[in-house]
Image (spheres, helix red, strand yellow):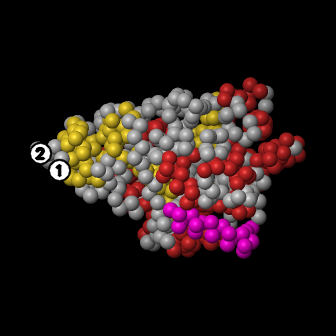
Amino acid sequence: MFDLLIQNGQVIDGAKNPGFEADVAIQRDVIASVGKLEGAEAARVIDAGGKVVAPGFIDIHSHGDFTLAACPTADSLIHQGVTTAVVGQCGLSLAPLLDATRDEVTPSLDTRRMPIPWDKWSDFKSYLDFMKALGLSINIVPLVGQGTIRAGVMKFASIRATPDQMAAMQAEGVKALEAGAIGISTGLVYPPGSYASTEELIELTRPVGQRRGFYFSHIRGEGQFLTEAVAEAIRIGRETGAAVQISHLKAGWPNNWKKQARAVEMIEQARLEGLDVSADVYPYLAGSTSLKSGLPQWAQEGGKGVMLRRLTEPGTRQKIVEGMKKEGLFQDGAWDKILISHSTRRPDYAGRYVADMAAEAGKLPEEWVLDALVETELDPNMILFMISEANLKTALQNPAVMIGSDSSTIPTHGPLAEGVPHPRTFGTFPRVLARYVREEGVLSLEEAVHKMTGLSANKLRLSDRGLIKAGLKADLVVFDPKTIRDRATYEDPFHYPEGIFQVICNGIPVIADGQPTGARPGRVLAGG
């Protein structure tokens, strides 16, 4: 007798094969059999008639680690059908924390004042031990953040690393890899990680390549310098041997949209060269990040206290305003397309556009931004409507592009449900299946599922997941291809999607008949 039997479903196996009608039997945490299993008995039987049975979705780019300690059931991810998430992205991992600098580093990481129990770990091993003991409803695949390492060793200085500092950073990276990190991530628009030169990044990544690990990168520019930033990521992969993942590929703002075609071409050329280079996207036309990220890089040097002092000095403020017009996220000045999504200190800002609030205050938008940053001690996040749908559709169709939410994981109710977070938090994977498969026909159902499962598993070398095949781990999702859809909007994001009925992680239902079970069978899928 099997533990669980899913009958009569249309199996989309994650390998781009045509769907086929079959039963899927589960024994403990493994797919025991796939086929017409007439007469099979099981402790629990699920009738999936009229529905798709697919591998559990893999979120190739998640920031769920920042909320999992407070939300180990990973509510917004499991409701989307996600069973595995890659965390520690954009150079920002929750470990390692070095004794000499942890009191400076942790406030810079905890930008939304989440209930993160920083005292429970120090090095990467103790961090992963904590996550294992916590118990999660999803599997996580950990990266170590280059920005966290650099802040720990060099604090927030924009100086070149000395040989001793370089050796210390490399040693921390190696310790994290040995503890279970599958690779390193960078966020090269976020200080202090952004202060690293290409040569420094290459040296830090060499041990990653030697261990056949991964280099995930929020690249140094997603607008004016997009192609140069893609070239840098490819160079790092070429010189270190690390597999490269370019995070949330996009060209921000209309002046730069034409550059995305060249960026994709560069990725394709690198792959033809034999390099392991790929990318991910989310299916929305807006990005999201911290408001302070729109300041010039030099204005962010030195950490929170120094930044706040600069923002109150009249002469320096004017230089910052001039820099905002010339570089970074604000250079297009599209203030009517920048929405404040969250501010702990000024919750009334959430859901409102910068242009409107500046006009009401009788200020220039740049001045309003600087005043808001001072008033809130740098805490607001923003949503920027800056992405071309034509570019998004083209990227979705590229065989080297996967799907990532680029979001934390939170519930729709309770203390974590603050502000108006980007709807990708709740709708990324269903949106692909609804808008870009069923409605727009950009992808076939088999192609879309492949990008969410088998393609990502192959990239991550998760040989026991990502496909529906006997002997592999039982991570599965059952959904209705006719009704699945995202319900979260920019104005009203706190809604789970429709059309997902069963989500199974390591053989255990975490969503059953559309409702969360509270089960926490997830695992840390560590490297090392």
Q: Quadrant of residue 421?
A: top right
User: Within 10 Å of the Cα at label 1, are there few (<14), some (14-19), or many (20+) other Cα atoms?
Assistant: some
Of residues 218 and 149, the one nearer the viewer is: 149
**Residue type pointed to by label 1:** Gly
- Label 1 vs label 2: CA separation? 9 Å
Would you name the residue on which mark 1 appears? 35
Q: Position of residue 188 (x, y in %)?
A: 64, 57
Horizontal placement of 430 versus 104: left or right? left
User: Within 10 Å of the Cα at label 2, are there few (<14), some (14-19), or many (20+) other Cα atoms?
Assistant: few
Of residues 160 and 476, the one nearer the viewer is: 476
Q: Quadrant of residue 254?
A: top right
Q: Position of residue 18 (x, y in %)?
A: 24, 51
The reply to whether the magenta stretch includes residue 82 is no
Label 1 secondary element: strand
Residue in the image at 30% along x and 36% along y: 480
Residue in the image at 77% along x and 27% along y: 361
Which of discs 1 and 2 lies nearer the camera? The answer is 2
Secondary structure mostly taken by the magenta-highlighted segment of the chain: helix
Would residue 59 be visible to someone looking at this image? no
The reply to whether the magenta stretch includes residue 168 is yes
Residue range (magenta): 160-180
Would you name the residue on which mark 2 appears? 38
Q: Where is residue 132 in the image (x, y as percent from the top left)?
A: 48, 52
Residue in the image at 74% along x and 36% along y: 376
Would residue 118 be visible to someone looking at this image? yes
Q: Is residue 232 above or below residue 327?
A: below
**Residue type pointed to by label 2:** Glu
Of residues 486 and 344, the one nearer the viewer is: 344
